[in-house]
Image: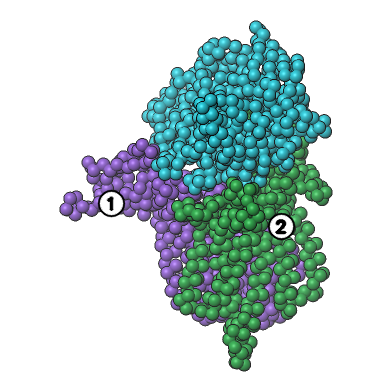
Amino acid sequence: MFKHILQRLGSTILLLLAVSFLTFWLMRATPGNFFDSLRLNPQISQEMVERYEKLYHLKDPLLVQYGHWLVNILHGEWGYSFYYNVPVTHVLGTRLFNTFILSFTSLLLTWSLAIPLGIWASLRANQWGDRLLSLFSFAALSVPGFFLAVLVLYIASLVGGLPLGGMHSPGYDEMSFFGKVWDTLLHLIIPASVLSLSSMASLQRIMRGNMLGVLRQQYILAARAKGLPENLVIYRHALRNAFNPLVTLLGYEFASLLSGAALVEIVCSWPGLGSLLLTAVRAKDIYLVMSSTLLAGVLLIVGNILADILLVLVDPRIRYEQ
Amino acid sequence: MIGLFLVQAQAASRYGGSLVEAVSSDPKTFNDIVSTDANSRVITSLLFEGLTTEDPFTLKVIPNLAKSWDVSPDGLRWVFHLRTDVRWFDGVFLSADDVVFTFNDLIYNPDIPSSCKDVLTIEGKPLTVEKIDDHTVRVILPVKFAPFLRAMGQSILPKHCLMKALRDKKFSFTWGIDTPVEQIIGTGPFQLSEYHPGERLVFKRNPHYWKKSKTQEQLPYLDKIVFLIIQDHQAQLLKFMDGELDAVGISGSDYPLLKPLEASRQFHIFEAGAAYDANFVVLNQNPRLNPKTHRPFLDAVKLSWFTNLSFRKALAHAIDKKKIIEILNNGLGLSQDGPMSPGSGFFYTPDVMTYDYDLKKAKEILKQAGFHLSPDGGTLKDPQGHPVEFNFYTANAASAGREAMSGIIRFDLERLGMKVNLVTVEFNTLVNKLMSSYDWDMVMIGLTGGVEPHFGQNVWASSGGLHLWNPRQKTPATLWEKRIDEIFNEGAQELDENKRKILYDEFQRIVAEKLPVIYTVLNMDMYAVRDKFGNLKPSVNGGAFHNIEEIYKK
Amino acid sequence: MNNSRISLAFKSFRQNRMAMICLWVLGLLYGLAIFADLISPYSYADEDRNFSYCPPTSIEFFDGPKIVPPFVYQKHLTFDAMHRRVFVVDRSQKYPLHFLRGGRLIQVDAPARLYLWGADARGRDLFSRICYGARISLSIGLIGVAISFIFGLLIGGMAGFYGGWIDGILMRVCEMFMMVPGFYLMLALRAAVPENFNSVQVYISVVLILALIGWASLARIIRGMTLSLRERDYVLAAKTFGVSDLGIICKHILPQTVSYSLATLMLSVSSYILAEAGLSMVGLGIQDPVPSWGNLLSNAMEIVPVIFAPWILLPGLFIFMAVMCFNVIGDALRDAFDPMFQD
């Protein structure tokens, strides 16, 4: 088990290197860098732009630039955001936190609704309730998330009562602690529910499928034949086995915490990573992009390892042995 | 006594309240010397002030931190008398040292990449800025320089706060967006009190601001200004209609949505006039060779079309400005023919050559220039028989309107028989093409303008880096470019405003006639502001809140 | 496992009523795409700026009390005091509909225009653009999935079959692609596409980008299936009879995976259609004037046109329908084939 995790960590570092170089190369493959947009300002001299370029080694060969970045990362120096003129960590910190709040809320919402719904549907398989739910799930899976967000925002603007995007009210700073929490929760409603709708739909389908699969198994039949109460059969025996495979999914959801919300964040003006990164990629704010990709990678790995450990904890049949 | 009492009672009620606005992105820095982008400028304009400023309506230069100035008869030696009642946010009084520091130690410092250095450098020489006493500063110009007073609108920064950063050679990175807000020290009406990246900036009232109202009341009136950072214009509109925002800048296409709501939602739309931001099409006329490949930057055949004035005129006749205004701005816009906007006021002249939308005329002009259609009528060929085909670049995201406009123009050019590949690229990529790789044919882009024509020197002088169609020429390629060079040199040194106007009128006529850039349409500057505010006087030059210190909540 | 079980699976699929409805709807949508030239009254680029945001044209059947062959009226665009668009119907002249003329099903004579579902900002017919857009949107998913499926099949099949270090390396490569957040990888890849590509080339590169992002997860799924298949008796038997590795992969393992992956593929098609829409929303999808449902929908991201010309939301409905159909069919296929993998 321990050895397995160590092994994974080892291969992971290599992977992170490969990913970071791939990103670096992609960012540099196209002509034009951030200072190019400064060149069109009639009040800025070209000498100044060139001085900046030298300061950041942007004229050096690709590998040298990448080397500079790598050495800095190893020293805990994440690089500099040209666009914001501050260290990358400063920009990323709060945005990461905001994205985390949104994604975590929607994750919570998804799992706390999808699992019961999935069980409910599996117990009524092919009855009208199940069919209605699956129709609804298909519909939810089929709307582009960003489009749904736009529609919900329009409707909310007609109905009123909910904040239309953003994370806090303008008067947030003067609120009491509970006022602040309440204000943030209100702002979370639209983006979090839009985000969780489609993942809820798919998770509900998966849970339903797993549950149905387990209920067909012989040991369930055996348990029923023994005359165990139906509730016990379902919630003690079936549920655990249906739930185990979902743990692996949780690991992946962990990784998509970072990027899954991007478009909805942009539409709902949520001050998270999504809008920041879209601007960064467009402006070729290279170190900002690199750092966030790296973070996403680390999160995915942490998520996977976490899922591995969880899986062992919940399912004693699984052991990692060579 | 009673009268005086009444005035005071009424006035006392003006204090307090807050204003919530929106900006489309985070500021990049609070350091006004190194900032280069418009959004940072919106923020810093509340914090910092210069010796002079522009009257938003007459566009004349008026006193600001300097209460008056004297000039020697030759126009070279200026003495500025500073106000004695100006205090920095931390309570320290403004002095001549701050002014000298700002110019000599910051702007002219070779280690600091300042964006204002170019404007304040005249014929390669800096201004000489000296302290006479605590509240008097002398500035000596190397040669006569007409836009001098306007250029003295440059923000003044506090020496006592920044000296240390300068000594540590860290000034370029000081006052970045990671600085604790209370450390940003200026003289403006409001000071920064909160900054939450990606969310909002909060400003509080500067209690010892120097400006007083006509009734000698301490300004500003408002307690607080909040800028919400909302990238998407649609989201801004929704938040304005919802009541969260107190003001929003709107375009012509938003007008029909908002105008009918004015009464019920208690706001008013101010139409300030034609905006400065020009949108234009430019053709590459760069004849030089790429020093790396020893091949021309631009294919010789294309060069022969683009340098052909008739070709450019035909293009100008193929731009359906009226419909572009209708489609993009619901009829709220102006067609632009010359290089300046009516918003520039005094120096603008409407008396330039205009080009109406007329495809027949365009075809006729092309025919006279030797271009002809292929027998099937579908392809335009040049006199040597080459089919006319080129790439038309425009930037995405920067402005949706520009992208749509390019599509409309492309459609008409195809009707002339040209094969035009519309290519939408990132703004950075486009700039790279224009400024360094020079591998472009036609581009749709925009530049912002202003009151003072000389500040566009970088575009119009043939040696300018922003002389888009053929940048950084050693000697002007054409006679008319030579004449524009002369106009800009003369104009900078001519102190008589009326004589300057004659020169710049000629410049506008030349550009409209020779069409190095083909102008399209100008948007109208419009602001929707809630009725709860008093003293609102929006102008193109200053926006909705140029007199922010006088605005109060009713 | 044999043919009869596969045909059994298809039989159970056919009994799924919802899936069959979706199959018909998809057929209709593909019909729109294939016969776009015939069905749509105009070419996708045909614009008439006098009809900016013209509402749907009403087709008249009555001339007073008399029934006459269908015709339309011409409309004139004006702006009211609030700068809203107002179309005034000009009843002075009737423009009869022409059927099957010039290779198109319905046409009217200029200057009148026939807008079945309204016009966009530049006076282009939305109905025609949706028909032509179907070509892009419905093919992008199919071609993209085909490419990533081939990749996924090869790599996943190899990894699963050989296991060991080959599996290790290939799966690490997969993880690398899955690790980069998809949306940003998409943006970065799109930024690396040469910008002077014409619309066909842009189309191909968008397809390739989507495929490049999608193959890794497919490969993982296929690896998992191969892993379980290779331990089956008949594969072991083939091995002992000395059938070559490639032969086993191609003859025994892949056919089994294909039938099951069909379900996964259907679901991937829908995610590709959605991805194209997302790419278009940030302005990096198929470029105007060539329509795709994604770039048509991106016009509906702005509140003002949606309020004054709600018909521009229609492409959203089409994306929804297509994605929903693929999802339902994919799910039904999985249900149908599932029993085969139960034992």
SS at badge 1: loop
Is any atom of residue B80 visible in this view? yes
SS at badge 2: helix
The residue located at (71%, 76%) in the rendering is: A314
- Residue B512's place in the image compared with B442, above or below, is above
Label disc, if present, on residue B188 of the rendered structure: none
* Residue B372 point in image, percent of width and height: 43, 30
Asked if marks 1 and 2 fall on the same chain, the answer is no
Label disc, if present, on residue C59 of the rendered structure: 1
- Residue B27's place in the image compared with C132, above or below, is above
Q: Is residue C52 left or right of residue C196?
A: left
The picture's colour for chain A is green
**Is the Cβ of the residue at disc 1 closer than 8 Å to that at disc 2?**
no
The residue located at (54%, 11%) in the rendering is: B499
Is any atom of residue B424 visible in this view? no
In this view, the residue in front, B235 or C231, is B235
Callout 2: 10 Å neighbours few (<14), some, many (20+)?
Answer: many
Q: Quadrant of residue B329?
A: top left
Label disc, if present, on residue A297 of the rendered structure: 2
**Residue most extreme to the front:** B1
In this view, the residue in front, B230 or A216, is B230
- Residue B487's place in the image compared with C159, above or below, is above
Q: Which chain is cyan?
A: B
The residue located at (79%, 72%) in the rendering is: A1
* Residue B456 point in image, percent of width and height: 59, 23
* Residue C339 point in image, percent of width and height: 56, 80
Q: Is residue B307 left or right of residue B133?
A: left
Q: How is the image coloured?
A: by chain
Q: Which chain is purple?
A: C
The residue located at (66%, 80%) in the rendering is: C232
Q: Give the residue type at disc 2.
A: Gly
